[in-house]
Image (spheres, rainbow, N blue to C red):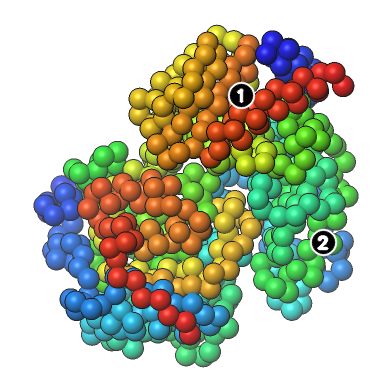
Amino acid sequence: MGNTINRRDFIFRSASLGTTIAFGGVLERLVGTAGYAGAEMPDLVVVEGANYYDSTRRAVETLGGMKQFVSKGSRVGLLVNSYFDKPGTYTKPQIALAVITMCYEAGAASITSLEDAPRSYWRRATLSKEDSERIDSVRSPGGTVTIDLPRGVKLKSVEILRDLLECDVLINMPIFKDHEGTRFTGVLKNIMGTTSSSSNRFFHKGALVSGYYDDPAFLSQCIADAHLVRKPTLCVADGTEMIVTNGPSGPGKIAKPHLVVAGTDGVAVDAYGATILGLRVEDVEMIQKAQDHGIGSADLNKLRITKLSV
Amino acid sequence: MLTLALVWFLTTAVADTSRPAAEGADVLASFFPSSNEIDQWVQSDSLRIFEGRDLYLLIDGGADIYFEYGFIRAGSAHYGNTGGNQLSLEIYEMKGPESGYGIFSFLAAGTGRPASFGQAAISGEDFVIFWKGRFVVSVTALDEGGRTGLSELVRAGDLKMKSEGSRPILTEVLLQPQFANSEVVYLRGALGFDRQPGPGRGSLFRFREGVSGAFGKCQTFVLRYETAAERDSAQQRVLKVMVNQGGYAYVSQGRSTGLLRSNRGAYLHVLGSEQYLQLVSGEGREDVLETAKKLRIAATGQKRQ
């Protein structure tokens, strides 16, 4: 990833997120707001069903529909966990495909796959001609920018995809699964699909006591700090089939709750996702640390959660 | 307690100290079946070898546990059939049989059912993982159709690997009949330690090696240090942090032993002797104390044998 913008080229401060952004004209999008204001709208929608495409559509519709988030002409950044190929380690392509379809139906002008899902990823789903055309139209991400994070506890700057900042709508699409260090991955951990390899190495090296990363607290704090850059507009998480041991790469024991979870608060989505893996919110440090930053709420007792079956 | 320490000292002193042979990527590559060796399955991409830190390129975000156990190199290849189904074969070469067993025991815990490959193996619906000497092998069906070729690919890889090795001696403490049905995990650092149910805070313990297993309703740990002084220092450090910052309080306290209770109601029994630290954690006070007692008896019995 190249094309790094020199931070002196742009000076932009976001007081609400405590972020010095080396990029111009994007504050309104970066502050991140829910796409609806309805008092009765749920905070989280959890849909159970064997047809993951249909579950995804139902989840977003129950949140108010994709038009609540994607307006005509929007540039959408889609962050799909697509790196690994073993069962239970990647967001099901049917779920991603449902979101892509809904984005275009809502009038999206373009969609960028921020993790640049390879062609082999899409081959894991049965695709119609129209599906293939939609996927062909999805763009690859461009270069990176470096952003200062004055409010970052451990991470004071991060090199991150320019498209993450430039897109009008950021849709985070993780799979909930086990992780060797943080115990859990979801919306929050997925941000590492947009940060540069040098930034990720810093996340992982921690205090460098052992010469490799063995400091989950440091990694968790870096992940929470990185989310000061931008909140997602929408999160659609894969809780259908996931590894509950040997994450993130597997192979591991697979659980099949057949759930799709959607919401606008990534911390809340992860808090719910952790429980799917049998964890308590307090077992996952990055959720706590992200909440401490004010990025979202992990208090499941205070969230409006709608559960459906399709 | 001195007996326990002696047992561990003696058994550790005679532990297998073999080191990985100076064999390189060619040896690792030779374990991968060629395209004509497995009926209906051919290697569908080039074999990739990852040396040292390059492991991050294979398992970005998941390599660190391998480094903790002592990683040398890994090979990865895919196999496909005419139906478009895919299998993934990965072979990890570790620093020695103890490292190989260690990462295998970590991966196997809670993951699958025992299987008959290599020196120890587990399998699930879509995968087989086995340990043989300093190597750990994982074969994964990447789709439902891939399951048909799973066993054949595992067998082919197993047959090519001739060298075997011994489990770490320390694991024998928890592999005795009294601890039947417990999954024993060999530990080399904080990442492995923190993934076991128990007190966490693995980075504080800084042990040389350890072993952990479930026993009834409790989780047991036996950690080895280089010297008694090193163990004592670690014990004091850990207990201080647990009491001052970790929400633990002493229920009882002796010279080298203590029973603590966390603010969540869990008990932790700590016993230090010579260079060994024994931990037993669980929800019930009597369960924890009884397990701590049995763990000492088990170690004593091991010496008698």
Residue at image point 26% right, 39% down: A153
Residue type, numbered disc 1: Gln
Residue B199, position as x, y percentages in the image:
50, 34
Whether residue A221 sits left or right of residue B194 in the image: it is left
Relative to B284, residue A49 above or below: below
Whether residue A260 sits left or right of residue A76 in the image: it is right
Residue at image point 59% right, 64% down: A255
Whether residue A114 is visible here, answered yes or no, is: no
Disc 1 and disc 2 on one polypeptide chain? yes
Kindly identify which residue carries mark 2.
B151
Q: Quadrant of the N terminus of chain B?
A: top right
Which label was assigned to residue B136? none
Whether residue A37 sits left or right of residue B174 in the image: it is left
Residue type, numbered disc 2: Ser
Mark 2 crowdedness (10 Å alpha carbons): few <14, some 14-19, many ≥20: some
Chain letter of the residue carrying label 1: B
Residue at image point 70% right, 42% down: B183
SS at badge 1: strand
Q: Quadrant of the C terminus of chain B?
A: top right
Whether residue B303 is visible here, answered yes or no, is: yes
Residue with the most extreme bottom position: A129
Residue at image point 49% right, 44% down: A181
Q: CA distance from mark 1 to mark 2?
A: 40 Å
Kindly identify which residue carries mark 1.
B278
Looking at marks 1 and 2 on the same chain, the residue that comes earlier in the sequence is marked by 2
Q: Quarter-wise, where is residue B176 in the image?
A: top right
SS at badge 2: helix
Residue B216, position as x, y percentages in the image:
67, 41
